[in-house]
Amino acid sequence: QVQLQESGPGLVKPSQTLSLTCTVSGGSITTNYYYWTWIRQPPGKGLEWIGYIAYSSNTYVTPSLKSRTSISRDTFKNQITLQLSSLTPEDTAVYYCARSGGTAYGDTNYYGYDYWGHGAQVTVSS
């Protein structure tokens, strides 16, 4: 059984950089042909697709966030990391990591992924 667990600071200040980690258990993040995606949900809004890192280590970030987003991995720890810089209150959201069997590019449909983490609340406030 694959499990994903997001972790992060919870509260960050505007202009700072957010670093979130998704720890994966029950399966390797390098296993063909899985993609590990970050998705967020601002309060009162729908899901927003952020980007992914593939089994191959290739990454893709949605254009609207690309200039301030980095997705990386640590294969020894079996973790995926999301870094989001220049934070504003509009970045306040619950952040999820999820796994799919293909790119699932732009997909915010719950059933587009076979495993989801429980989510990490991030609040950007001074």
Image (cartoon, rainbow, N blue to C red):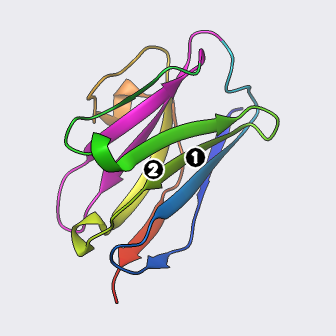
Please report the residue visible at 44 percent of the width from the left and 78 percent of the height from the top.
12
The part of the chain drawn in magenta is 32-56
Specify the farthest residue to the top.
Answer: 32
Front disc: 2 or 1: 1
Q: Which residue is mark 2?
A: 96
Please report the residue visible at 56 percent of the width from the left and 73 percent of the height from the top.
9
Q: Which residue is mark 1?
A: 81
**x, y (%) of residue 33?**
57, 10
Please report the residue visible at 52 percent of the width from the left and 55 percent of the height from the top.
118
Tell me where residue 110 sits by quadrant.
top left
Specify the farthest residue to the right.
Answer: 76
* Residue type at the position of mark 1: Thr
Reply above or below: 34 against 18.
above
| Quadrant where the C terminus is found in the figure | bottom left
Does 95 appear in magenta?
A: no
| Tag 2 and tag 1, C-beta contact below 8 Å | no
Mark 1 neighbour class, 10 Å CA radius: few under 14, some 14 to 19, many 20 or more: many
**x, y (%) of residue 15?**
34, 73
Reply above or below: 45 against 22.
below
**x, y (%) of residue 16?**
42, 72
Q: Secondary structure at mark 2?
A: strand
